[in-house]
Amino acid sequence: MNENLFASFIAPTILGLPAAVLIILFPPLLIPTSKYLINNRLITTQQWLIKLTSKQMMAMHNTKGRTWSLMLVSLIIFIAMTNLLGLLPHSFTPTTQLSMNLAMAIPLWAGTVIMGFRSKIKNALAHFLPQGTPTPLIPMLVIIETISLLIQPMALAVRLTANITAGHLLMHLIGSATLAMSTINLPSTLIIFTILILLTILEIAVALIQAYVFTLLVSLYLHDNT
Amino acid sequence: MLSRVVLSAAATAAPSLKNAAFLGPGVLQATRTFHTGQPHLVPVPPLPEYGGKVRYGLIPEEFFQFLYPKTGPYVLGTGLILYALSKEIYVISAETFTALSVLGVMVYGIKKYGPFVADFADKLNEQKLAQLEEAKQASIQHIQNAIDTEKSQQALVQKRHYLFDVQRNNIAMALEVTYRERLYRVYKEVKNRLDYHISVQNMMRRKEQEHMINWVEKHVVQSISTQQEKETIAKCIADLKLLAKKAQAQPVM
């Protein structure tokens, strides 16, 4: 039972070669590009969605922050697509691996911080002390703010990993619960199956929301530092 | 071909280079010719308007047509599924229920919101086309307006001579009026001058008359000596007394 539960989180290999690379490279195949003005419905809806999200997301940045728009839009599309594809049966979600999320979060966060320290060093250092703190509290508050800054990338990565992993685990558990109950008591199976359906809807929402949250926080750090 | 020309030119220019062996590979590369065949896909062929038909969103229609002469596709499908289940090639596990719920939610979503999304996408495309169409129509309309304006201008040009006639008449009238005004002014000026001379003459005559009268009076008064004055006065008194007597006599009658 234990082995089976976490089996879906092992990075897949084919004859010892990592297939995770292929799985990570798969989602862009589902978002076609086109050189025509009038496309089929898939491309039209995708283009409209991407235009909507990019406009909404980059509206609050200044010119320097908008140089990050390609990065942030591709980030949200990637995370949303991998999360949604991970809901299919027997599929592997790369974002459940802490290694990958750390690899996404640390460079992005470090990029924003270093950009802030390079351009406006006084503003970047001023973030360490909120306004209007009483004087005796200042040393402690600086330490606390530093710690909260340094924990941002870890929080980003762990948040995404934990949410997606927890969702997948819960689906697996409730699925096995229905499997077990199907031989014992049929009506309760239906109840548990309804719970599973509700959970699926939640998971779809969580997949999209997590992508959004990740990207939004990175864009927030960017806004602070430009 | 050009490289061969260059080579022969270099050979004639610097005979020592004729034996240069290191030009060999470069010559081989340079003499390979490109772009000799006919270009493919010119012009780019248009895309088909609708995709191929599929059943159940996954299996293309051609698969069914392919199978129909030999075996029923649904029977084949059912058979395969039952075979996999019975031989435990596909194990019913927790994933099965997860798969059922995910696929169920997906099918429900597609069936319910599919047409809405399709119409939305079609509407987006139609908006793009309508924008371009409107630009084209606006351009055509603009040019049509220009043509109409030009035609009306041409028609107006035909009737321009009325305007010129009226203007000519106006100018002639203005010239006439100015001429008459000036004539009148000339007349007045001349009359003024002549009146001046006349009044000068009149004044001179008056002055001469007055002067003469004064002179005559003066001399007359001077000529009356005292003797004559006394005699004249006595005579006047005597005349008056006579007249008084005559006058008194009248009212008694």
Image (cartoon, rainbow, N blue to C red):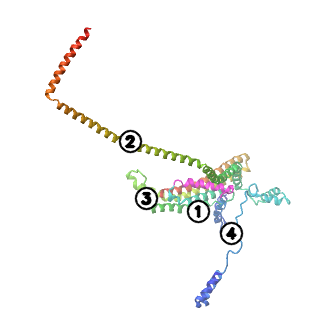
For disc 1, the marked residue is: A100
Mark 4 in CB contact with mark 2 (< 8 angstroms): no
* Image quadrant occupied by the N terminus of chain B: bottom right
Q: Earlier in the sequence, mark 1 or mark 3?
A: 1
Instruction: Please name the residue that numbered disc 4 is placed on.
Output: A15
Determine which residue is flagged by label 3. A125
Question: What subunit carries mark 4?
Answer: A
Q: Chain of mark 3?
A: A
Position of residue B92 measured from the top left corner of the image (x, y, whole percent): 73, 56
Q: Position of residue A112 (x, y in %)?
A: 50, 60
- The C terminus of chain B sits in image quarter: top left
Q: In the rendering, at what x and y percent does residue A176 appear?
A: 69, 53
Q: Nearer the viewer, residue A129 or B83?
A: A129
Instruction: Give residue A20's quadrant in the image.
Output: bottom right
In this rendering, would B35 be left or right of A213? Answer: right
The residue beneath circle 2 is B191
Say what secondary structure mark 2 lies in. Answer: helix
Magenta span: A37-60
Dominant secondary structure, magenta:
helix
User: In the orientation shown, which residue stands out farthest toward the right?
Assistant: B69
> Picture quarter containing residue B189?
top left
Q: Nearer the viewer, mark 4 or mark 2?
A: 2
Amino acid type at circle 3 is: Leu
Q: Amino acid at mark 1?
A: Met
Which of B148/B84 is in front? B148
Q: Chain of mark 1?
A: A
Q: CA distance from mark 1 to mark 2?
A: 119 Å
Question: Which comes sooner in the sequence, label 1 or label 4?
Answer: 4
Would you say B199 lies left or right of B47 here? left
